[in-house]
Image (tube, rainbow, N blue to C red):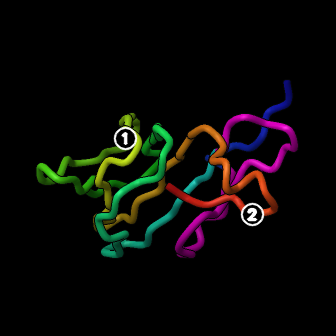
Amino acid sequence: MPVLTSTDALAPEPRRGAVWSIAEPGRELDANVIRLPAGESIPAHRGAEVDTLIHVVRGGGALLGEDGEEELRPGDVALLPRRSVRGFRAGPDGLEYLTVHRVRQALRIGGAPGAS
């Protein structure tokens, strides 16, 4: 069971989007580290047909949902139920979070992994 990555070792560049994705073949789980630079956001949207667990790695900001927003701090873990509305807004130090979810069927047919 190899270590896949160290979130402490990811380059601190201000790049937006997936800065790491699990690549091992034949897996049932997908995982990504998503980075939003300071002040950037992912608009609220309805998630896919999979439950998604997120873990805030560094920075902070807000999780946006149908019932308002929840502050996110390093170490926070949240469960985003399938088909729930979610969005993210990075705070002044940016926001970096790990997502883990079951592989979506559409992605098994030649698609690239996506972020949740």
Splitting the image into 4 quarters, where does residue 29 fall? top right
In depth, the one of 85 and 79 nearer the eye is 85
Splitting the image into 4 quarters, where does residue 101 fall? top right
Main SS of the magenta part reads loop
In this picture, residue 19 sits left or right of residue 36 = right
Q: Is residue 16 above or below residue 55?
A: below
Residue at point 70% right, 54% down? 21
* Residue 5 painted magenta: no
Tell which residue pokes out farthest to the top in this image: 1
Q: Amino acid at mark 1?
A: Leu
Residue at point 79% right, 36% down? 27
Which segment did they paint magenta?
A: 9-30
Which residue position is annotated with label 1? 80
The earlier-in-sequence mark between 2 and 1 is 1
In this picture, residue 8 sits left or right of residue 88 = right
Splitting the image into 4 quarters, where does residue 82 fall? top left
Which residue position is annotated with label 2? 111
Tell which residue pokes out farthest to the left in this image: 67
User: How far across and how far down the image is residue 93, in percent?
Assistant: 36, 64
